[in-house]
């Protein structure tokens, strides 16, 4: 399966298939049943997971019938991919449209569902237009980036009654759904507080400062683009709604000013051709990235490999947030985007005990002989010392009052994002074949998307004002 992010730590999930404890129970499709017709809106790297799924394990129930993107070079890449997957002599030759042609595409190609994988700030408009043109939507997180975007989406849903699927793939990682089951079981009593620490390393974290994400007007900053995943997890774990947010943070590591202060200036303008700089991404090192971005630059000038220490970065790389929940729990959350290792730690305190989830996704970022950062340290002998002290893995512990700690077994997943991607894709493309309800409650809709971005939107306001923000005071189009 195509990974959604080449700079993220490689998956450690099993190759033999996910555990039946976490895979949805399904029936086979009816013989001769028509396949669902999908259009992909946004043909960057993020689209690859869906294209791969619909031309592989889920091709019997769905098919891609059209592309929409401003860059014909990226469409060429995926159209060629589909052509090869269909054993054609050349490209698939699917119809292609630009942003102005969304409604025409849905009508002319009889599109049932639009998959939105464009930059975050465009989600609301595209969702609104797709729903009103008669298609349902599958959308990558975040749902949107602003209060206005929330209102546009909720209005379109109210007017059309159509469906939105949020692809919160971290819900499907067995370690995360296992923590939810521990909380739901009552083993630690009523939850009083959650501490959630997420560390992005200097490969994956730096990547948000190379590309379009580094402009807050595009991504909403990491509090929305990245942390909406994490806020959704806490909402999911607690089965609760956030009510009040206080946030502090800033750009403390990346950006030109920080580079000058640490003697890292001058910097290369871009990563490709930068040589042994460990913070640079050379697109030549990844043929897929080169085909999707380096060659298509001539169409729109977009650079995927910008310097993370460039001028004009407007997002934060260090964030600390306090969130109150309606049920009385309080979350303390931190995000660091320049850690030497990658992973997260979650502590859930309850009236009868405590649950702790620790995940190491990449134990170290090491450099190869040329001085470049190695994406998978486990593949190099140089990383063995670091791996012994911080091995990649996951552990879920529960300790009740007056008792010793116990380890909770975590079922096996499959694919990236902690073994959740393959399970998510099964949910997205085969949910009409599900037998009964998901006992783990993992499917996410637009309200889950609202609850996640509401924390980030309120957090961004708090960053600006220095004050706590009541989510009830936001105009999101409907109450959470």
Image (cartoon, grey):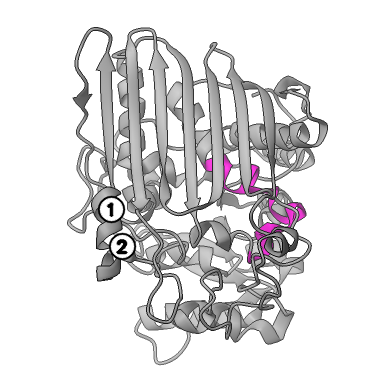
Per the model, the C-alpha gap separating discs 1 and 2 is 13 Å
Magenta-highlighted stretch: main secondary structure? helix
**Residue 426 seen by the camera:** no
Q: Position of residue 353 (x, y in %)?
A: 32, 13
Residue 180: tell me if it is visible: yes
Q: Which residue is mark 2?
A: 57
Which residue is tagged 1?
Answer: 414
- On whether residue 421 falls in the magenta region, the answer is no
Side (left or right) of 52 relative to 46: left
* Disc 2 element: loop
Quarter of the image with the N terminus is bottom left
Residue shown at 30%/49% (left/top)?
A: 390
**Which quadrant does the C terminus fall into?**
top right
**Number of residues whose C-alpha sits closer than 10 Å to that of mark 2, classed few (under 14), some (14–19) or many (20 or more):** some
Q: Tag 1, which secondary structure?
A: loop
Residue 227, magenta (yes or no)? yes
Q: What residue is at 47 percent from the left and 67 percent from the top? A: 48
Relative height, residue 115 to residue 277 (above, below): above
Q: Quadrant of residue 112?
A: bottom right
Most foreground residue, 226 or 261: 261
In terms of depth relative to the viewer, which is nearer, 114 or 464? 464
Q: Residue at x 53, y 79 (%)?
A: 282
**Of pointers 1 and 2, the one earlier in the residue sequence:** 2
Q: With 435 as the anchor, is 318 left or right in this view?
A: right
Specify the quadrant of the image occupied by residue 175: top left
Left or right: where 122 falls relative to 339: right
Residue 44 is situated, as x and y percent measured from the top left of the image, at: 57, 69
Segment colored magenta? 210-229
Name the spot of residue 366 as percent of width and height, x first: 39, 66
């Amino acid at each position: 399966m195509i990974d959604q992010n080449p700079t993220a730590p490689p998956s450690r999930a099993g190759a033999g298939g996910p555990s039946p404890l976490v895979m949805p129970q399904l029936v086979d499709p009816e013989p001769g049943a028509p396949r669902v017709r999908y259009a992909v809106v946004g043909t960057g790297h993020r689209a690859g997971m869906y294209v791969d799924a619909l031309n592989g394990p889920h091709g019997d129930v769905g098919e891609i019938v059209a592309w929409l993107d401003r860059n014909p070079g990226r469409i060429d890449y995926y159209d060629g991919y589909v052509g090869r997957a269909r054993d054609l002599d050349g490209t698939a030759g699917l119809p292609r449209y630009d942003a102005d042609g969304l409604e025409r595409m849905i009508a002319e190609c009889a599109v049932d569902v639009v998959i939105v994988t464009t930059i975050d700030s465009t989600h609301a408009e595209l969702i609104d237009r797709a729903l009103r043109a008669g298609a349902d939507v599958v959308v990558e997180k975040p749902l949107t980036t602003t209060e206005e975007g929330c209102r546009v989406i909720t209005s379109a849903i109210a007017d059309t009654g159509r469906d939105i699927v949020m692809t919160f793939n971290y819900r499907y990682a067995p370690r995360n759904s296992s923590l939810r089951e521990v909380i739901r079981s009552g083993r630690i009593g009523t939850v009083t507080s959650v501490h959630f620490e997420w560390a992005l390393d200097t490969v994956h974290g730096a990547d948000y400062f190379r590309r379009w994400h580094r402009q807050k007007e595009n991504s909403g900053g990491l509090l929305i683009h990245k942390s909406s995943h994490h806020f959704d997890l806490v909402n999911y774990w607690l089965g609760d709604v956030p009510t009040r947010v206080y946030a502090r943070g800033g750009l403390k590591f990346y950006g030109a000013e920080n580079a000058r202060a640490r003697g890292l200036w001058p910097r290369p303008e871009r990563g490709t051709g930068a040589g042994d700089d460990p913070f640079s991404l050379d697109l030549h090192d990844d043929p897929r990235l080169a085909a999707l971005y380096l060659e298509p630059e001539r169409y729109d000038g977009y650079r995927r490999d910008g310097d993370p220490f460039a001028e004009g970065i407007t997002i934060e790389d260090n964030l600390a947030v306090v969130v109150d929940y309606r049920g009385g729990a309080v979350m303390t959350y931190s995000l660091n985007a320049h850690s030497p290792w990658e992973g997260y730690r979650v502590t859930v305190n309850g009236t009868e005990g405590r649950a702790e989830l620790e995940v190491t996704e990449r134990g170290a970022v090491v450099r190869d002989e040329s001085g470049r950062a190695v994406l998978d340290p486990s593949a190099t002998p140089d990383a063995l010392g670091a791996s012994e002290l911080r091995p990649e893995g996951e552990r879920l512990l529960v300790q009740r009052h007056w008792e010793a700690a116990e380890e909770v077994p975590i079922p096996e997943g499959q694919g990236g994002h902690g073994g959740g991607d393959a399970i998510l894709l099964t949910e997205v493309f085969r949910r009409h074949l599900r037998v009964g309800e998901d006992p783990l409650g993992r499917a996410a809709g637009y309200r889950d998307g609202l609850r996640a971005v509401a924390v980030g939107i309120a957090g961004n306001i708090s960053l600006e004002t220095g004050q706590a923000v009541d989510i009830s005071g936001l105009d999101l189009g409907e109450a959470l």
